[in-house]
Image: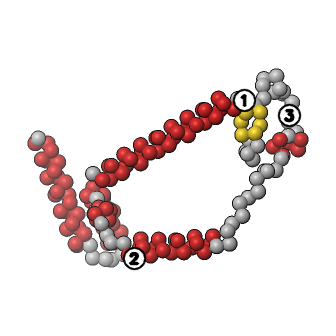
């Protein structure tokens, strides 16, 4: 139940966020007029049909040749240390200190539909290598019997 609630909340949050950004883009477009933002953060006025010509545009004299006006962000000298220590603390918690919960048990549980397929593919490979597969063959026969019983019961209903 909590998984469905989590999925619902994450989807609704994503939809609301998308709507908010779409609305803000529409408002900024209508308030700013025929202006768009260039790749380097400069404002470029949209050209009208009269200004568009069939002649090729020379790159060196166009606005595309202008370097970015923004300097790249300088990294803090402690940033690598902070990132590495944060990752280390997270990994220690997640891989060592955290106790297993019901979601972990759900993940480790075998998928009944895939177990039969996996066993039917694994048994011939193990036989080629000379490994004893009697216990796997018994489990495969058990799974086939369960599947046939379930199909028979479904046909009776």
Q: CA distance from mark 2 to mark 1?
A: 56 Å
Q: What label sits on residue 56 in the rendered view?
A: 3
SS assignment at label 2: helix
Q: Residues within 10 Å of mark 3 (few under 14, many from 20)?
A: few
Q: What label sits on residue 96 in the rendered view?
A: 2
Residue 82, percent across and down? 58, 72
- Closest to the observer, 51 or 79: 79
Residue 5, percent across and down? 33, 49
- Against 46, is 96 above or below? below
Which image quadrant for residue 33? top right
Which residue lies at the image location 41% right of the left edge and 48% below the top edge?
10
- Closest to the observer, 116 or 26: 26
The earlier-in-sequence mark between 2 and 1 is 1
Which image quadrant for residue 47? top right
SS assignment at label 3: loop
Q: Which residue is mark 1?
A: 34
Residue 119 seen: no
Q: CA distance from mark 3 to mark 1?
A: 23 Å
Dots 2, 1 in contact, CB < 8 A: no
- Against 5, is 129 above or below? below
Q: CA distance from mark 3 to mark 2?
A: 62 Å
């Amino acid at each position: 139940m909590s998984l469905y609630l989590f999925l619902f909340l994450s989807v609704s949050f994503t939809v609301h966020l998308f709507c908010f950004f779409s609305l803000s883009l529409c408002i900024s477009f209508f308030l700013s007029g025929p202006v768009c933002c260039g790749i380097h953060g400069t404002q470029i006025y949209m050209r009208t049909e009269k200004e568009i010509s069939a002649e090729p545009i020379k790159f060196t004299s166009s606005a595309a040749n202008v370097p970015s006006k923004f300097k790249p962000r300088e990294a803090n000298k402690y940033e690598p240390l902070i990132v590495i220590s944060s990752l280390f603390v997270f990994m220690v918690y997640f891989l060592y200190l955290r106790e297993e919960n019901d979601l972990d048990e759900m993940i480790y549980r075998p998928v009944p539909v895939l177990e039969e397929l996996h066993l039917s593919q694994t048994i011939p490979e193990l036989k080629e290598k000379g490994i004893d597969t009697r216990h796997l063959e018994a489990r495969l026969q058990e799974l086939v019997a369960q599947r046939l019983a379930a199909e028979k019961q479904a046909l009776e209903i």
